[in-house]
């Protein structure tokens, strides 16, 4: 027995030593020995990165990344990301780089870059039957760009030309949209008049949809590079060296030729003179604004979004609560046909995502009936979608409150000579209101948070604005401030609803 105990101790000691040795090995492992390379990209940005008909992620940039990984012996991980959250993805270490037609110009000091490899232009796409033939024709029009894109920077950044800044002032609206899929849906439906995008993406869309045309004039030009977390020059240098090898043996040019239909072969500029303008060999820390200054600046920018959020909230309650009561009456009707209509309505609205319902309300008139959807309809569609959705939930809450009142009270009212209308108004309805306050409060609090779904229709409420500022500031602070607002507002809502509940206690 003593021998067995000593033997067990020896085995345990050896295991511990092995584990410690493994930890030292892992800690001392060189970055050259990495096994995976995680590329962050926008999966709705063809031809640089997108999902093909077979469900695979493909694109020019992804094909370059695959060849780099093959030569380095890495496993490529293609990670689709929300473009507005790319900085958080990169800085948190969730991805190793942003490789997706990413513009260097204006972002030189924000990342560690390879040399530029594509000379890109921002161009304007309009409907083929549009009367827009030149940039000057965009006066008074709604122009769409992607959030935190080179197209947006071409009109609004400090480096934007005076001509472009002056042109942007003539627009009816410069609309920021989360992705180009939504932008082209808006263009096709008529809710925007033009989309400013990268030339490669423009050619891809022209190949997909013959109803679009490209203006001859370009808005701006810039260069693409591969972006790494600021200071991560070790990984950057590995990728840079491999790209140079690919260029020298012709592989890079050959990959570009696979995408010649999208103007990529013509725009290839790797190793050209001047493409190393953002290539750094040091990782000197960047100066940052004081916290207080950033907090005040971001809060001011979010003010407009707060007003939009409150507008959605109050108008949705104004329309959905009485509509829900009407649906309740239909649902409790003696007529079977009306009952089934209400049941189907409730089933569909509660059984499908609110975001999908918003898209149907906004794009449905165009794709079902060929109607043109104006820019002003965007906010109306948001209110209609939210009101219809929440009315379905309120209807079932009201019905539960009404049916939970004992039938004896209706019988007593009938004996006392009350009409059905009087019985409902003076006896049933007040008690129903008291009973449904807790579940209604839950729905109202949920509505405050659900207002952020208005981004699906490119309506800029507070959370969408916070994401846009997060992307431009490379900071999580805007989302934190937005979270504080949601909490404070929901706290106020809960207090108000609790006060209403107390006043109804006499029932």
Image: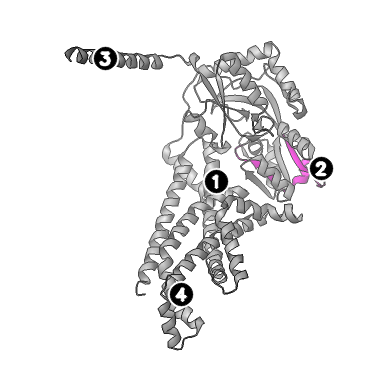
**Residue reaching furthest front?**
1
Q: Nearer the viewer, residue 387 or 407?
A: 407
**Earlier-in-chain disc, 1 versus 4:** 4
As drawn, is 40 to the left or to the right of 154?
Answer: left
Magenta highlight range = 122-148
Instruction: Characterize the local packing of mark 4: few (<14), some (14-19) or many (20 or more) Cα atoms within 10 angstroms.
Output: some
Q: Quadrant of residue 272?
A: top right
Instruction: Characterize the local packing of mark 1: few (<14), some (14-19) or many (20 or more) Cα atoms within 10 angstroms.
Output: many
The residue tagged with tag 2: helix, strand or loop? loop
As drawn, is 47 to the left or to the right of 490?
Answer: right
Of badges 3 and 2, nearer the viewer stands 3
The residue tagged with tag 1: helix, strand or loop? helix
| Circle on res. 429 | 4
Point out the image quarter for the N terminus.
top left
Q: Which residue is mark 3?
A: 13
Instruction: Characterize the local packing of mark 2: few (<14), some (14-19) or many (20 or more) Cα atoms within 10 angstroms.
Output: some
**Earlier-in-chain disc, 2 versus 1:** 2
Q: Quadrant of residue 51?
A: top right
**Earlier-in-chain disc, 3 versus 2:** 3
Q: Which residue is mark 1?
A: 465
Q: Could you tell me how far apart the alpha carbons at marks 1 and 3 are, in whole angstroms?
A: 57 Å
| Circle on res. 133 | 2
Residue 374 visible to the viewer: no
Q: Identify which residue is drawn at 44% across, 71% down.
A: 432
């Amino acid at each position: 027995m003593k021998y067995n105990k000593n033997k067990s101790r020896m085995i345990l000691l050896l295991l511990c030593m092995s584990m410690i040795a493994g930890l030292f090995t892992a800690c001392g492992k060189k970055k050259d020995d990495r096994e995976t390379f995680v590329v962050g990209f926008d999966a709705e940005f063809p031809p640089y990165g997108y999902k093909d008909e077979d469900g695979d992620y493909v694109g020019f940039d992804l094909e370059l990344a695959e060849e780099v990984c093959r030569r380095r012996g890495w496993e490529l991980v293609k990670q689709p990301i929300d473009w507005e959250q790319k900085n958080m993805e990169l800085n948190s270490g969730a991805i190793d780089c942003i490789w997706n037609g990413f513009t260097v110009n204006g972002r030189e000091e924000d990342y560690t870059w390879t040399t530029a490899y594509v000379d890109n232009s921002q161009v304007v796409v309009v409907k083929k039957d549009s009367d827009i033939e030149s940039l000057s024709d965009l006066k008074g029009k709604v122009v769409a760009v992607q959030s935190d894109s080179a197209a947006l920077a071409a009109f609004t950044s400090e480096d934007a030309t005076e001509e472009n800044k002056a042109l942007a002032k003539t627009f009816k609206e410069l609309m920021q949209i989360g992705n180009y899929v939504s932008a082209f849906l808006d263009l096709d439906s008529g809710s925007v008049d033009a989309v400013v995008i990268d030339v490669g993406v423009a050619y891809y869309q022209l190949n997909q949809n013959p109803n679009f045309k490209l203006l001859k004039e370009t808005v701006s030009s810039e260069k693409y590079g591969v972006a790494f977390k600021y200071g991560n020059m070790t990984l950057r240098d590995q990728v840079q060296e491999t790209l140079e090898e690919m260029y020298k043996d012709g592989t890079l040019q050959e990959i570009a030729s696979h995408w010649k239909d999208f103007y990529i072969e013509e725009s290839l500029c790797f190793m050209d003179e001047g493409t190393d303008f953002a290539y750094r060999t040091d990782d000197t820390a960047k100066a940052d604004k004081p916290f207080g200054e950033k907090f005040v600046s971001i809060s001011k920018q979010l003010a407009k979004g707060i007003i939009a959020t409150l507008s959605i909230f109050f108008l949705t309650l104004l329309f959905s609560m009485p509509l829900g009561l009407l649906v309740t009456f239909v649902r409790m009707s003696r007529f079977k046909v009306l009952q089934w209509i209400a049941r189907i309505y409730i089933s569909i609205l509660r059984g499908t995502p609110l975001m999908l319902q918003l898209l149907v309300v906004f794009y449905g008139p165009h794709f079902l009936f060929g109607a043109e959807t104006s820019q002003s309809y965007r906010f109306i569609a948001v209110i209609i979608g939210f009101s219809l959705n929440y009315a379905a939930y309120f209807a079932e809450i009201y019905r539960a409150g009404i049916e939970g009142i004992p039938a004896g009270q209706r019988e007593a009212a009938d004996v006392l000579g009350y009409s059905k209308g009087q019985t409902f108004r003076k006896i049933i309805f007040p008690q129903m209101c008291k009973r449904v306050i807790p579940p209604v409060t839950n729905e109202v609090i949920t509505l405050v948070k659900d207002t952020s779904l208005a981004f699906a229709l490119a309506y800029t409420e507070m959370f969408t604005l916070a994401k846009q500022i997060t992307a431009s500031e490379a900071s999580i602070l805007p989302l934190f401030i937005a979270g504080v607002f949601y909490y404070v507002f929901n706290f106020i809502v809960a207090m108000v609803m609790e006060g209403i509940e107390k006043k109804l206690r006499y029932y």
